[in-house]
């Protein structure tokens, strides 16, 4: 690739926009996955604790 | 339908997703590595467009993927409406933000390609306008899920929008043949075969596959999150009911 060619700014900008948008999308999807997994673990722990307190836990 | 039901079971899906996810990432990164290497270093510059033609290796796969993801959404919506399978609604909902980003990228990189080649960022011609309509359909679909609290009602309305909006997909594809357009006509998926030389076509197809695998990788995670989010909602609703 010839970086001194005309309009290279447009080419670099295209790849930069693509990189930023795809990384942003991936970060958002990963962040949501982590927050959902954390909340699910929290609910499971709360449920287990409540079962212990009410004596409904597994023997 | 039994095999669909077997694999569309949310718990089974979660197990399958965990097993295949690392391999999907490996294939995605490998395809991007090879595609970018060939497209940026091995493929020749265009005799008319010069180096600007390299925008094609992100613009065209983004546009293909935007159309493919919308087709996946429409198909999942049909399955959701006909068979009432919740995983189909989840799959359609999880695909929408990914497709919207691909569509945005097709529009943005198209504008960045259009300015030096056509002398303008944007024209309201058939291909560009129908692609913009696709972007609006993605935004509208996501807005429905955000605006309606009841997931069953939201899924029905969103599915109808996705299915009706699918009419725009062939319009985008054939717009360059049906109407006069600044945009060039189809040169890869056409009746007479591709009109592009193999040195340019190969990296383009590899980048197309890379975008498809990226969609698969992100979609699998997004579906898993949505299944989890629904379980959270059900648990919280059950607790609220138990307290009352």
Image (cartoon, coloured by chain):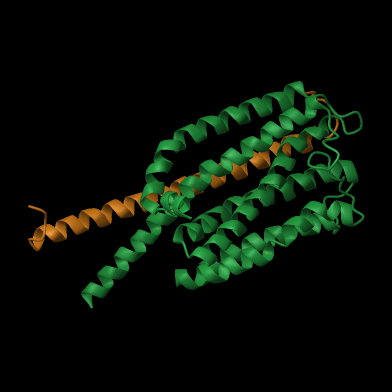
Q: Residue at x 86, y 48 (%)?
A: B183
Q: Residue at x 54, y 57 (%)?
A: B92
Residue B193 falls left or right of residue B71: right
Single out the residue that lies furthest toward the bottom. Answer: B244
Residue B201 screen position, x and y as percent: 77, 31
Residue A44 falls left or right of residue B192: left
Quadrant (top left/top right/bottom left/bottom right) for the C terminus of chain B: bottom left
Residue A27 falls left or right of residue A40: right
What chain is the orange one? Answer: A
Single out the residue that lies furthest toward the front. Answer: B2
Give the vertical position of B119 relative to B28 (above or below): below
Residue B144 showing in the rendered view: yes
The quarter of the picture where residue B211 lies is top right
Residue B21 screen position, x and y as percent: 46, 38
The quarter of the picture where residue B170 lies is bottom right
Residue A3 showing in the rendered view: no
Along the line of sight, which residue is nearer the eye, B159 or A14? B159
Give the vertical position of B209 relative to B172 (above or below): above
Residue B89 screen position, x and y as percent: 50, 61
Along the line of sight, which residue is nearer the eye, A15 or B16? B16
What chain is the green one? Answer: B
Along the line of sight, which residue is nearer the eye, B120 or B53? B53
Q: Residue at x 7, y 61 (%)?
A: A55
């Amino acid at each position: 690739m010839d970086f001194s060619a005309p309009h290279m700014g447009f080419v670099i900008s295209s790849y930069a926009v693509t990189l930023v948008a795809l990384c942003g999308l991936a970060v958002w999807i990963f962040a949501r996955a982590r927050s959902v997994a954390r909340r699910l673990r929290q609910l499971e722990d709360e449920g287990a604790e409540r079962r212990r307190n009410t004596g409904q836990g597994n023997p | 339908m039994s095999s669909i039901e077997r694999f569309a079971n949310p718990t089974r899906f979660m197990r399958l997703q965990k097993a295949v996810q690392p391999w999907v990432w490996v294939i995605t990164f490998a395809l991007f590595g090879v595609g970018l290497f060939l497209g940026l270093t091995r493929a020749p510059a265009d005799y008319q467009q010069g180096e600007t033609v390299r925008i094609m290796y992100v613009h065209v796969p983004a546009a293909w993927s935007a159309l493919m993801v919308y087709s996946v959404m429409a198909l999942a919506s049909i399955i959701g409406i006909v068979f009432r399978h919740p995983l189909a609604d989840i799959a359609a909902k999880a695909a929408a933000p990914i497709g919207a980003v691909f569509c945005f990228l097709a529009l943005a990189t198209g504008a960045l390609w259009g300015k030096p080649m056509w002398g303008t960022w944007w024209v309201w011609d058939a291909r560009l306008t129908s692609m913009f309509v696709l972007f609006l359909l993605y935004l509208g679909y996501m807005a429905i899920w955000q605006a309606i609290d009841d997931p069953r009602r939201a899924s029905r309305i969103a599915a109808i929008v996705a299915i009706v909006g699918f009419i725009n997909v062939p319009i985008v594809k054939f717009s360059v043949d049906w109407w006069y357009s600044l945009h060039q006509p189809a040169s890869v998926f056409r009746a007479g075969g591709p009109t592009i030389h193999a040195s340019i076509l190969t990296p383009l197809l590899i980048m197309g596959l890379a975008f498809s695998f990226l969609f698969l990788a992100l979609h699998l995670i997004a579906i898993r999150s949505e299944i989890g989010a629904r379980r959270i909602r059900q648990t919280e609703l059950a607790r609220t009911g138990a307290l009352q």
